[in-house]
Image: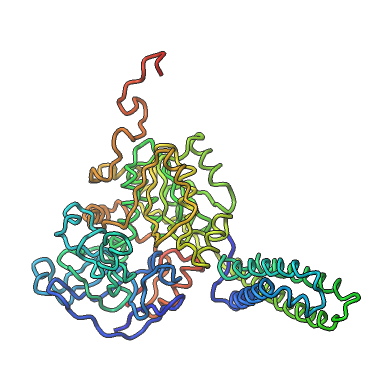
Amino acid sequence: MRALVWHGANDIRCDTVPDPEIEHPRDAIVKVTTCAICGSDLHLHDNFMPGMEKGDIVGHEFMGEVMEVGAEAKSALKVGERVVVPFTIWCGECDQCRRGNYSVCERSNRNKALADKMFGHTTAGLFGYTHLTGGYAGGQAEYVRVPMADRTHIKIPSGLTDEQVLFLGDIFPTGWQAAAQCDIQPTDTVAIWGCGPVGQMTIRSAILLGAKQVIAIDCVPERLAMAKAGGAITIDFEEESVVERLNELTGGKGPEKCIDAVGMEAHATATIDSMMDRAKQALMLESDRAHVLREMIYVCRPAGTLSIPGVYGGLVDKMPFGMAMNKGLTWRMGQTHVNRWTDDLLNRIQEGQIDPSFVITHTVPLDQGPEMYKTFRDKRDGCIKVVLKP
Amino acid sequence: MAYYDRSSAGDNLARGLGWFSIGLGFAEVMAGRSIARWMGMEDKTNLIRAYGVRELTAGVGLLALGDPKPWIWSRIAGDAVDMATLAAGMENNPRAGNARIAFGAVMAVTALDAVCAQTLHREEAYYRSLPVPDYSGRSGFPRPVSAMRGAASDAPIGEDMRTPKILQFQGAGGAGFPSPPRGEG
């Protein structure tokens, strides 16, 4: 089969690789009909995520048709069913899964010993990501093996297009959880850093959950235009001061809820601290650029909430934690517990409350994937979200 | 925002110059005295080391800090300073021939820097000339935003995702805690 394969920094290729096979009775094989490049795939492409190995198949946002089902998954899945596969693999049986904390499933990371060493305790296995999260083959491919498939799926009813439901596997519930864990009140101002795909979903989620005011921060004109279309007041951080504008929009008090939809690769040249971060990153003195976290801590209203769906990989430097502590900020973060939200979100898509396909700007065949990684990374050609067709 | 393409000809040249800066900077810092002596400018040893730090900074900027244009221009400015220093150092210098060789090398690299800057600006002009896609109609909602605000306020969100009552911001009425009696607050 053909698949997008990681070969090193800035080197993802469309290779021919062996077809996946059932390896465990809970497995299923899914023929991928549509997949997408996620912003967090760029961290792999740019080689900022530790634990990648040459030959890894990438991609964690995908859907398709069930082709083969292992003996222990047959009660939950049938050949021919159409499924979106969540990026977090979950067993449904461990203590964390029983609490709904699927992204920290205790049993789905097959490299648990490595993750225990790195994180203290393991988190869930993820598709197409670092070996710290299991090193499972990803879904930017013609076929994919889905471990623990009796749990790790979202069944899709007929009548909905792939494009309408594909993002149930990652960015839509990620944006939703980012907003939900802020516990948005009708009086709240929610500030969202980053108008990439997750930021766009977060903006819509905050509106649907009833925020009084949603403010989106970015510097890419077309992304800001899309944010505005979704109901956000926009701030172009290259044109105006984020701090001054946020204070102006909140009567000097600051936003009650701040969401980081940027993560470890914050814009490298906009501020001095970002430039220092980028230099330190290049010299391997830190792994993540934390400008957005610093700015959120500074601008957030005391006793407010910071929500962090943006991906961080390791160590950050110069974190003003004293400021956060003295302001009594609540921090909510983590990978998305995808299946916790998907029944509700699928209903909302079916009812027509939202159509997540609004974010798609490019649709290309799988073999054009490597080039689209670069287009997406460099934000060329108005690129916000790339969908691939194997 | 600055437009640049991290796989373009201009960017590749900028990266090459970035590595050159790192190499030259390292040499100037570590072997500043030897370089100064070779050019017959021993009294400029510390200055050459300082130029090495400048080169290292430009190298890191070119290789790691996104848009390479400001760093290429900083290199061109640095080249001018280098040439001025070398020109001044040639007077009454028994090793003026070596200094002239260094001057020629700096001129050659300056030409390369200028070509790089020109290429990068031409590439940016090309990207800026492309039409900007119009996403202003892409709300994702079936009705105007004002009609969708709060449409999912009944969403099932677990208690573990809720903010404890005591930490919630409230409108009129507060969180239900009594105000302190007058005079005690």
Q: Position of residue A64 (x, y in %)?
A: 24, 71
* Figure label count: 0
Q: Identify the residue shown where x is 33% and y is 74%.
A: A140
Q: Position of residue B179 (x, y in %)?
A: 35, 20
- Is residue A156 visible from the viewing direction of this image? no
Image quadrant where residue A23 sits: bottom left
Residue found at the far right of this picture: B92
Q: Is residue B169 above or below residue A358?
A: above
Residue A342 or residue A96, whichever sits in front: A96
Q: Identify the residue shown where x is 42% and y is 46%.
A: A258
- Is residue A53 visible from the viewing direction of this image? yes
Indicate left or right for A77 with A168 as reference. left
Q: Quadrant of the C terminus of chain B?
A: top left
Q: Is residue A216 above or below residue B65?
A: above
Q: Position of residue A60 (x, y in %)?
A: 31, 68
Indicate left or right for B174 with A262 as reference. left
Residue A209 or residue A191, whichever sits in front: A191
Q: Position of residue A361 (x, y in %)?
A: 43, 65
Q: Quadrant of the N terminus of chain B?
A: bottom right
Q: Is residue A123 above or below residue B82?
A: above
Indicate left or right for A93 with A223 as reference. left
Q: Is residue A211 above or below residue A227?
A: above
Q: In this figure, which colouring scheme has been used for the structure?
A: rainbow
Q: Identify the residue shown where x is 49% and y is 60%.
A: B134
Image quadrant where residue A159 sits: bottom left
Residue found at the far top of this picture: B183
